[in-house]
């Protein structure tokens, strides 16, 4: 399973949504792993699974163009574009590959058996007779 780790090195928290889920990018955080589909939607690009391409200037410029429209940095009033560029410069994008590993299940991890269905029916019949 492929994901993109987004590291926000700025001093501002950011949050965006995809498919009803909120993804937070905490300031100066350790990073947030996003499913590839969510990262492509939020940042507006198809992420390659190559770290060198993810950090290339051309690729970062494409992300910034899309992100500046999405997060409202493309407004020239109050120099928002320059502020957005300074913040974006502190973002990093790292491709991550997760592997699913099968683990042995121990008996104590299994749920308890539900019991016989007739047991619950008899209990209900006894309660009705008592009333």
Image: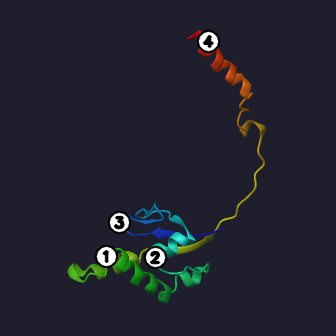
- Badge 1 is on which residue? 72
Few, some or many residues within 10 Å of mark 1 (<14, 14–19, 20+): few
Q: Earlier in the sequence, mark 4 or mark 1?
A: 1
* Percent coordinates x, y for residue 73 in the rendering: 31, 78
Quadrant in the rendering for residue 102: bottom right
Q: Earlier in the sequence, mark 4 or mark 2?
A: 2
Residues at circles 2 and 3 in contact by the CB criterion of under 8 Å: no
Q: Earlier in the sequence, mark 2 or mark 3?
A: 3
Q: Is residue 24 left or right of residue 112?
A: left
Element on which disc 3 rests? loop
- Badge 4 is on which residue? 129
Between 124 and 14, the one nearer to me in the picture:
124
- Badge 2 is on which residue? 43
Between 6 and 131, the one nearer to me in the picture:
131
Q: Is residue 50 left or right of residue 12?
A: right
Q: CA distance from mark 2 to mark 3?
A: 17 Å
Q: CA distance from mark 1 to mark 2?
A: 13 Å
In front: label 4 or label 1: 4
In front: label 2 or label 3: 2
- Badge 3 is on which residue? 12
Q: Earlier in the sequence, mark 3 or mark 4?
A: 3
Q: CA distance from mark 3 to mark 4?
A: 66 Å
Q: Residue at x 65, y 68 (%)?
A: 1
User: Which residue is the extreme one toward the top?
Assistant: 130
Few, some or many residues within 10 Å of mark 4 (<14, 14–19, 20+): few
* Percent coordinates x, y for residue 79 in the rendering: 24, 81
Q: Residue at x 61, y 78 (%)?
A: 49
Q: Residue at x 37, y 76 (%)?
A: 70
Q: CA distance from mark 1 to mark 3?
A: 15 Å
Q: CA distance from mark 4 to mark 1?
A: 69 Å
Few, some or many residues within 10 Å of mark 3 (<14, 14–19, 20+): few
């Amino acid at each position: 399973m492929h994901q993109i780790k987004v590291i926000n090195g700025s001093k501002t928290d950011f949050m965006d949504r995809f498919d009803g889920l909120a993804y937070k990018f905490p300031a100066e955080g350790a990073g947030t792993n996003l499913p590839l589909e969510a990262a492509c939607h939020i940042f507006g690009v198809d992420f390659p699974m190559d770290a060198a391409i993810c950090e290339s200037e051309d690729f970062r410029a494409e992300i910034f163009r899309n992100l500046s429209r999405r997060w409202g940095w493309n407004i020239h009033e109050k120099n928002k574009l320059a502020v957005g560029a300074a913040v974006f410069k502190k973002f990093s994008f790292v491709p991550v590959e997760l592997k699913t590993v099968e683990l042995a299940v121990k008996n104590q991890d299994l749920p308890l058996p539900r019991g016989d269905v007739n047991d619950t029916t008899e209990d209900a019949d006894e309660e009705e007779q008592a009333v």
